[in-house]
Image: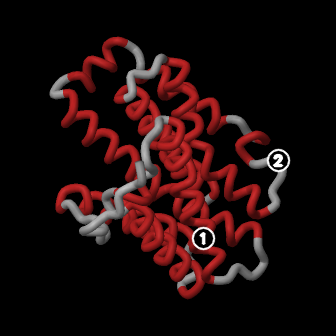
Amino acid sequence: MDSILFIFEIIGVIAFSLSGALTAMKKEMDIFGACVLGMTTAIGGGIIRDLILGVTPPAAFVNPLQAVLGLAIPAITYLPFIQKLFAHDKHRVQALSLMIADSVGLGVFTVVGVNACFQSLPNPNFFTGIFLGVITGVGGGVLRDVFSMHLPKIFVKHFYACASIAGAITAFLIRVFLKDILLATIAGAVVVIALRFLAFFLRWNLPKPKYPIEEEK
């Protein structure tokens, strides 16, 4: 079980670090910027979660494998022949690749956060489980967007945080009522990824103001 969950988490790290690298490409950052952005996206949410739980130093510093992968994936992505793959039909390929990587990373780390809640707290309540799942899922992406001077996706685009909330609720309820860690992990991640794909292709967005207030000049 532990090895399966470990592999699952590594998939999330690879996906999120790739999303960081693709964001860096869109912003025309150099390879150093891409590596920093990739690592931040991969481990940022987990660090925030561990600090909330009082786990110090955070797991990312005790076992640096995730940080190393977060640096390595962007470096590989910046190899010339890899860049050519993303340069073909540039905007469409990059947008689709970023959505897939971001969705997989969001799904995996949402359930990782829920699992961490059960591991660290003797009697986790519903709010704490969902909050830690969501903060683990979206935390790295928020840092990535801020570092790349974007308004974070959780506030503006593609049903992002709500998908994480739905996946966290799914994982939490399965763990509480069915006591099946693996099923909770897979089902929670699938819910997040499925909702993100539907939101992307069907253009789901939460309501926005029809008459936004203009800033004073």
Query: Which image quadrant for residue 161?
Result: bottom left
Query: Which image quadrant for residue 96?
Result: top left
Checking the image for residue 74, the label placed there is: none
Checking the image for residue 131, the label placed there is: 1
Question: Which amino acid lies under the numbered mark 2 shown in the image of this protein?
Answer: Pro
The answer to whether residue 133 is left or right of residue 162 is right
Q: Earlier in the sequence, mark 1 or mark 2?
A: 2
- Marks counted in the figure total 2
Query: Which image quadrant for residue 2?
Result: bottom right
Please state the horizontal and vertical placement of residue 155, each as a whole percent of the image. 42, 60
Checking the image for residue 57, the label placed there is: 2
Q: Which of these two is toward me, 6 or 59?
A: 59
Label 2: how many Cα within 10 Å (few below 14, some 14–19, many 20+): few
Q: How is the image coloured?
A: secondary structure
Please state the horizontal and vertical placement of residue 211, each as a whole percent of the image. 27, 67
Which residue is depicted at the point 73% across and 56% down? 50
User: Nearer the viewer's eye, disc 1 or disc 2?
Assistant: 1
Residue most toward the top? Answer: 80
Label 2 secondary element: loop
Which residue is depicted at the point 60% across and 70% down? 131
Q: Is residue 204 above or below residue 10?
A: below
Question: Which amino acid lies under the numbered mark 1 shown in the image of this protein?
Answer: Phe
What whole-number distance in Å separates the C-alpha atoms at marks 1 and 2? 21 Å
Which residue is depicted at the point 31% across and 64% down? 212
Q: Can you say which quadrant of the picture contains the N terminus?
A: bottom right
Asked whether the residues under the numbered discs 1 and 2 touch, taking CB atoms below 8 Å apart as contact, a structural biologist would say no
The answer to whether residue 66 is left or right of residue 51 is left
Which residue is depicted at the point 55% across and 87% down? 177
Q: Is residue 182 above or below residue 4?
A: below
The answer to whether residue 88 is left or right of residue 69 is left
Label 1 secondary element: helix
